[in-house]
Image: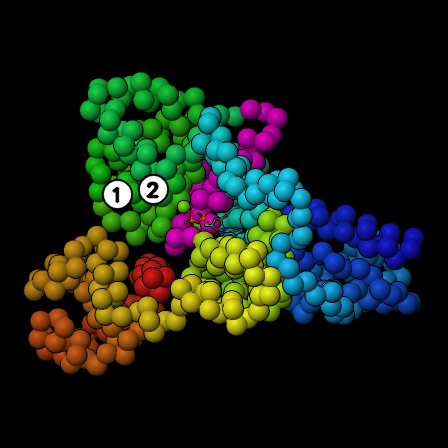
Amino acid sequence: MNNVELWQSVLAQMQFHISRANFATWFQNTEIISKDNEKIIISVPNAFSKEWLSNKYNKLILKTLHDIDDTIRELEFVIKPQPIKNAVLKTPTGREEQEEIQLKFEEFKINKDTNLNPRYTFASFVVGSFNELAHAAAMAVADNPGYTYNPLFIYGGTGLGKTHLIQAIGNKINDEAKKKKIKYISSEKFVSSIVSAIRTNTMEAFKASLAPIDILILDDIQFIAGKNKSQEEFFHIFNSLYEKNKQIILSSDRPPNAIAELEDRLRSRFEGGMIADVSLPDYETRLVILKTKLQEKNADLPEEVLDYIAANVKKNIRELEGALNKILIHGKINPNLNVETTKKLLRGFVFSPFDVANYKKIIETVAKFYNLEEKNLFDPTRRKEIVKPRQIAMFLLRKELKYSFPAIARKFGGKDHTTAIYAYKKILQENEENNKLTEELNLIKQRIYSG
Ligand code: ADP
Ligand code: MG
């Protein structure tokens, strides 16, 4: 077996272990450049691939090689830069070719039966430590719907892949031979269907239409909070599906215990299965995501441009995609793209904590999170529902904006500044002891900083 064949068979095996997206990103343009005695040297296109492969996949690659040839005991990765490509899109010239690519860019058609967008697959979903658990749970559910985790509850901030992931489950099940009836519904749509069924006295028909569903996917379920009639009907729908081992998949912008005005019996149903969060990807993962998206679009960008985007667009994955698209469109017209032009183009995407977190933003976010009006935070009341959010607002003003305690007290209607100190210390301490509060604070902060 020569080096090329050897590497081909390693690559063939690696595909079983990692997603197509990750595979394409990290193993493209790699090859064995030498093999002497026990040591194999593999060339990779850049420092990121090198770091990623040697940290994450070293063991797996070595084991795979060793299984084929047991004299191999050591690996080394060396960087062999690829010829520099300046052009953004890979040279489609003819008009027809152009149009074909245009088509690929367009959204896929939504499946009319299931409401699923076929674009959202596991293959195009990048996994990192920020979403590992949610991804694993989603895969388990897709493999054995109704019997592993029921319901599956995925939560996290906006643009972090919840919709993608829960639709990927539906798409995977839908691709399998044994046909199951799958339905994806946004909670907004779901609630409005319930409301109109109540109004037109057709609730039984509505429920009958849901009965044959094997997999029910409800996106953004936090939307049902405070809508009592809908919650009541949903509770019965939930139970009748659940009792028949039908899979229920939910997403939300926060965990069940942080959804205010959610009936307790629904909350405990939501907590009865598996709860997993998606958080923010780190720099490395953002780079992987960018590369995956480039590949999907059959496009290319200079490494330092990608690096700039990954290092600076941190808000969420939707923004990251938006930034990439902006650069690609610009690049189509002006092929000489560099970091300077990228910087200018991405001004709106790049955020610095200093321009985003401000007094108004903190008050607004805390009030909204606890379903209060902003002015409620300033009510002179000792009601628990108000006191805690008020203390959190004070805490964040101090912690995030370094407000002085007297300044905080002034903002809150001239209270004694010891009240502000008390609030700060109380939240600080509770944050250490109470996981639920920590989680809430994290979600609130995520929102404050995501504009
Ligand atoms: P959410 O529902 O949490 O607001 P979405 O699922 O709509 O977020 O994701 C926003 C965009 O980011 C989508 O285009 C989606 O394909 C993309 N995206 C999110 N997470 C990932 C991921 N892990 N890998 C690849 N693309 C992702
Ligand atoms: Mg969504």
User: Is the residue 385 above or below the residue 264 in the image?
Assistant: below
Where does the magenta region start and end? 150-179
Quadrant (top left/top right/bottom left/bottom right) for the C terminus: bottom left
The amino acid beneath tag 2 is Ile
Please report the residue visible at 79 percent of the width from the left and 64 percent of the height from the top.
Answer: 42
> Which element is circle 2 on?
helix
Mark 1–mark 2 distance (CA, rounded to whole Å): 8 Å
Nearest the viewer among 303 and 44 is 303
Check disc 2 and report the residue beneath it: 221
Please report the residue visible at 37 percent of the width from the left and 47 percent of the height from the top.
Answer: 252
Confirm if mark 2 falls within 8 A of ligand 2: no
Indicate whether residue 414 is drawn in magenta: no
Query: What is the count of numbered marks?
Result: 2
Residue 145: horizontal and vertical position, in percent? 51, 34
Please report the residue visible at 31 percent of the width from the left and 38 percent of the height from the top.
Answer: 188
Check disc 1 and report the residue beneath it: 225
Indicate whether residue 154 is drawn in magenta: yes
Q: Is residue 92 left or right of residue 337?
A: right
Residue 298: horizontal and vertical position, in percent? 63, 50
User: Is the residue 413 above or below the residue 295 in the image?
Assistant: below
User: Is the residue 49 above or below the residue 260 in the image?
Assistant: below
Q: Is residue 355 left or right of residue 48?
A: left
The amino acid beneath tag 1 is Ala
> Which element is circle 1 on?
loop
Residue 395 appears anywhere in the view: no
Residue 232: horizontal and vertical position, in percent? 25, 32
Residue 332: horizontal and vertical position, in percent? 57, 56
Nearest the viewer among 412 and 64 is 412
